[in-house]
Structures are given as structure tokens and as C-alpha cells.
Image (cartoon, rainbow, N blue to C red):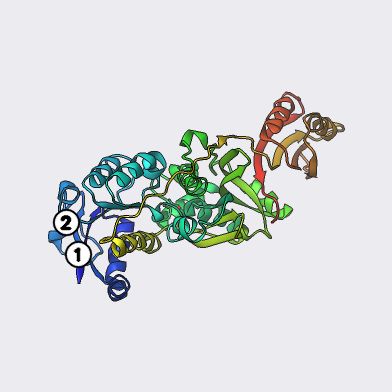
């Protein structure tokens, strides 16, 4: 039987998942591909570290050239993460006519265009299913099964760490710091959780999905992003009372000649399918003009789910390795203007002095800025400070900003505590 030789760059969580699945499902993979997948070399930093994988010590190397410039290696699997040196290794592997599979969202969101160009020029594949949504087959579904559709919307929960944190804050009433600490102890959040909780991870992923769906590369600086660091227990409590849960949503929408990408915490109606996505799970909703709405749901992180997506790409390449390499995803010809309008309903929470006329004064400012109020909640507090919560009808974010600029100058407003996007019911 023909052998397909694999070189792995990095031996962290996802790589160990990959190696374990290859061994667990060896027979199934043989019968599905008609080939033997064999790990030739694995790049590690430390040759002497104990690893939870069944691989002979002779397979490990600290020299990337033993993979990238190794003529025995057919597929290079990049699982190091980060941009450098992953970018150089992937570029050189493609230039050496090796197929590449990666789970690296930062790399693909930043250098995907250049790397796909090199892959096409060299007749090899660059595949990155695992870069978005862990084990959820979102990229393959969009590029193959749903390729008959003109997509108008891609949105969902694409970061498992923040979803775990927000779920725990919601269900157990704990504060953000405690939930982050717990997520770290459970192995969901990194020691430095900033890329997840500040929204960068989700921004990389929606930029990739937006390219897959709309055929246009979007620079990360064109993705307005807001993380979950300012979400308090109080906002979660109000959300609950008003019939919502708070989720970190990444979205890309196409309208006529415009595309709008955004990452931000969002009030999701409890009846919305995304409200039921909890803990480390991810879900992506697609809207296509033929298929309608489709939601894909599954584990967005972890060794085995992400290893499953990586191995799926390896198998796809292995099946077609002796035939002509397929082309990379091609950009579509139509160009869209990237906008940042933030047209949505909004939740606004503020602390005001509890005395006659204050609510009327603030409502008047909203009215002058064409903001229509959908609901208003005021709680009684005995210390003369009243928390006021507004939910607006749909309006552009600039109207909200302009209104709040004026509200801030009003002496009876003590603090504007939160502004959070509100999603409509489906
Ligand atoms: N850090 C990511 C998450 C997993 O929490 O979803 C890898 O993309």
C-alpha cells in the first residue's frame, strides 16, 4: 500500500490529539484512503520532555529542516501557533512542493493570501479546517457542500474560552476574574488569556470565514473588536431578567456592495439557537440564498476535536495525492466596501441621580438622535442612585455614540456603565 509521510511542526495539545487519533483509527483510515499515513518526523523544542503519545524517540527532532527540506515528507502539518517562525516554515514547505495542513488562525488570517498563492504556484494544497471552530467542519462545508450558495451572513460563537467564561458567569453568578481562573485550571484558557478574552482569536476566525464565504480578504484592522473584559455580573443579571444571555459573537454580513465584520459581546434572546451553545462549545450560523439558515455546532477547542479537523485535511490530501493537486480557494471577483456601521439594537446601562425629570431629559437626547427606545427599566435604590437600563430599537452605532456624548455632559448622570449590542430573535 502507498505510504503518505507526514512531518509535524510542534508537539503541543493539538499535535498529541492528532497522533492519538491516527493510532486509534488506523484501520478506518487505511480503508478510507487506501494509503498508510506515517509520521516521519516531529519538530519539538525539547527532545527530553515526557510526552503522552506513542511515538518512537527517533522521530523527534529540534531541526525544522529535517521536515521542511526532507524529500520523504509529503505533508507538513504546522501546529506551532503564532506567526513566527510558523510563516517561514509553511512558506518554505510550500516552496518545496509539500502540502501543508495548519490549525493556525493567526497565520491564515494574516498571511493566507500570500501562502495560498505560493501553494497554487507549486501545485500543492494549503488546508486549514482546524483554524476555525475546532472540530466543526465549517470551512469544508462552506467550500464544498454549500458552494452553490451566495452567502449573506456568517455569525456565531467561535471562541470556546470566552464561551466557557460567560456560561459560568451566567449559570453560577461568578465574576469574570474567577471564571477566567477556572477556565485556566480546566485547560481552556491560556496562561495569558488576552487573545481570547480581548476578542483577537474570534477576529482571526471571522476574517477567515468571511474570506471563505465572500471571497474577499479583510485586514484585521478592518474588524472592529471588543472582548468580554468589561462584562460584569450586573449586565448578565439584567440580560437574564430581560430574556437574554450574553455571548461573544463574531459576525460578517454582506449587504449590496458592503461587508461588515464585527466581534463583540451580544445580548442573545434566550429563544435563539445560539443561546443554547454553552461552555467550550462553538456554533456558526450561515445564511445562504439557496439553503437558508444552517447552524453547525460542536467542540471549538481541545486536542481530539481539533486533531480530528487536522486529520480530516490530511486524509483529504492523502486521497488525492497521486492525482493533480486541487486549486486553493479562489477569491471572487466582486469587491465589497468594508464598513463599520453597527446597525443593531443596543442595551445601555447607566447610573443616574434619582430625582424628577432625569429619565425624561435623557430620553429626549435619545429622541433627538433618532434613537427609538424599545424598553426602559429603572430599579429603586435607597441611596438616591438609580440604575437605568435602556434597550433601543435598531439604529447605527454612531447615533448611540453621539447621544451618549451629550448624556455624559448631563450632571445627573453619574456613570455610563455598559453599551452592548442586542441580537434580534430569529
Ligand atoms: N483559544 C481558542 C478558543 C481555541 O478558546 O476557542 C483555539 O482556536
Q: Give the label on residue 60, or none.
A: 2
Q: Is residue 78 visible?
A: no
Q: Quadrant of the C terminus?
A: bottom right
Which residue is at the far right? 356
Instruction: Return the x and y of residue 179 as percentages of the image width and height.
Output: 51, 52
Distance CA(mark 2)–CA(mark 1) = 9 Å
- Farthest residue to the left: give it: 58
Q: Would you say the residues marked 2 and 1 are in contact, meaning their CB atoms lie under 8 Å apart?
A: yes
Q: In terms of depth relative to the viewer, which is nearer, 398 or 290?
A: 290
**Left or right position of 141 against 350:** left
Task: Check disc 1 and report its element: helix, strand or loop.
Answer: loop
Question: As drawn, is 155 to the left or to the right of 416?
Answer: left
Give the residue pinned by disc 1.
55
Q: Is residue 409 left or right of residue 216?
A: right
Crowdedness of circle 1 by 10 Å Cα count: few (<14), some, many (20+)?
some
Above or below: residue 45 compared with residue 111: below
Q: In the rendering, at what x and y percent does residue 244 appear?
A: 68, 54
Q: Secondary structure at mark 2?
A: strand
Left or right, 80 with reference to 396: left
Q: Is residue 216 visible?
A: yes
Depth order, front residue of 159/166 = 159
Against 257, residue 131 (above or below) is below
Is the C-beta of the residue carrying label 1 under 8 Å from the nearest atom of ligand 1? no
Within the image, what quadrant is residue 293 found in? bottom right
The image quadrant where one finds the N terminus is bottom left
Callout 2: few (<14), some (14-19), or many (20+) C-alpha neighbours within 10 Å? many
Q: Residue at x 28, y 63 (%)?
A: 318
User: Does the Cβ of the disc 2 residue fall within 8 Å of ligand 1?
Assistant: no
User: Residue 347's spot in the image, x, y percent?
Assistant: 70, 43
Location of residue 288 in the rendering, given as x and y in whole percent from the top left corner: 59, 55
Mark seen at residue 365: none
Amino acid at each position: 500500500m502507498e505510504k503518505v509521510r507526514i512531518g509535524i511542526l510542534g508537539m503541543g495539545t493539538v499535535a498529541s490529539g492528532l497522533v492519538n487519533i491516527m493510532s486509534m483509527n488506523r484501520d478506518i483510515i487505511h480503508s478510507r484512503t487506501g494509503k498508510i499515513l506515517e509520521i516521519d518526523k516531529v519538530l519539538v523544542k525539547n527532545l527530553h520532555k515526557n510526552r503522552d503519545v506513542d511515538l518512537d524517540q527517533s522521530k523527534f527532532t529540534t531541526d525544522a529542516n529535517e521536515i521542511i527540506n526532507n524529500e520523504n515528507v509529503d505533508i507538513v502539518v504546522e501546529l506551532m501557533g503564532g506567526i513566527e517562525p510558523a510563516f517561514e516554515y509553511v512558506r518554505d514547505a510550500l516552496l518545496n512542493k509539500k502540502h501543508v495542513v495548519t490549525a493556525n488562525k493567526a497565520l491564515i488570517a494574516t498571511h493566507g493570501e500570500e501562502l495560498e498563492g505560493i501553494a497554487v504556484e507549486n501545485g500543492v494544497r494549503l488546508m486549514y479546517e482546524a483554524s476555525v471552530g475546532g472540530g466543526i467542519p465549517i470551512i469544508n462545508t462552506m467550500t464544498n457542500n454549500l458552494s452553490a450558495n451566495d452567502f449573506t451572513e456568517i455569525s456565531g460563537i467561535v471562541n470556546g474560552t470566552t464561551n466557557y467564561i460567560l456560561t459560568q458567569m451566567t449559570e453560577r453568578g461568578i465574576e469574570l476574574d474567577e471564571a477566567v481562573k477556572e477556565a485556566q485550571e480546566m485547560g481552556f484558557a491560556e496562561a495569558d488569556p488576552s487573545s481570547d478574552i480581548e476578542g483577537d482569536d474570534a477576529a482571526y476566525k471571522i476574517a477567515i470565514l468571511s474570506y471563505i464565504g465572500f471571497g474577499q480578504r479583510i485586514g484585521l484592522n478592518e474588524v472592529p473588536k471588543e472582548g468580554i473584559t468589561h462584562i460584569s455580573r450586573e449586565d448578565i443579571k439584567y440580560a437574564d431578567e430581560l430574556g437574554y444571555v450574553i455571548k461573544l459573537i463574531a459576525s460578517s454580513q454582506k449587504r449590496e456592495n458592503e461587508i461588515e465584520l464585527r466581534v463583540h459581546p451580544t445580548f442573545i434572546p434566550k429563544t435563539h439557537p445560539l443561546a443554547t451553545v454553552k461552555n467550550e462549545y462553538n456554533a456558526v450560523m450561515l445564511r445562504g440564498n439557496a439553503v437558508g439558515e444552517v447552524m453547525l455546532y460542536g467542540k471549538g477547542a481541545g486536542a481530539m476535536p481539533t486533531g480530528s479537523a487536522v486529520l480530516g485535511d490530511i486524509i483529504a490530501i492523502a486521497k488525492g495525492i497521486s492525482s493533480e493537486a486541487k486549486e486553493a480557494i479562489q477569491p471572487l471577483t466582486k469587491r465589497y466596501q468594508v464598513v463599520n456601521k453597527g446597525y443593531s439594537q443596543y442595551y445601555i446601562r447607566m447610573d443616574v441621580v434619582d430625582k424628577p425629570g432625569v429619565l425624561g431629559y435623557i430620553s429626549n437626547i435619545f429622541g433627538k438622535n433618532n434613537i427609538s427606545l424599545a424598553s426602559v427599566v429603572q430599579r429603586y435604590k435607597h441611596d438616591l442612585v438609580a440604575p437605568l437600563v435602556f434597550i433601543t430599537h435598531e439604529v447605527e452605532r454612531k447615533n448611540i455614540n453621539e447621544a451618549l456624548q451629550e448624556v455624559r455632559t448631563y450632571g445627573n448622570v453619574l456613570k455610563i456603565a455598559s453599551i452592548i449590542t442586542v441580537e434580534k430573535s430569529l
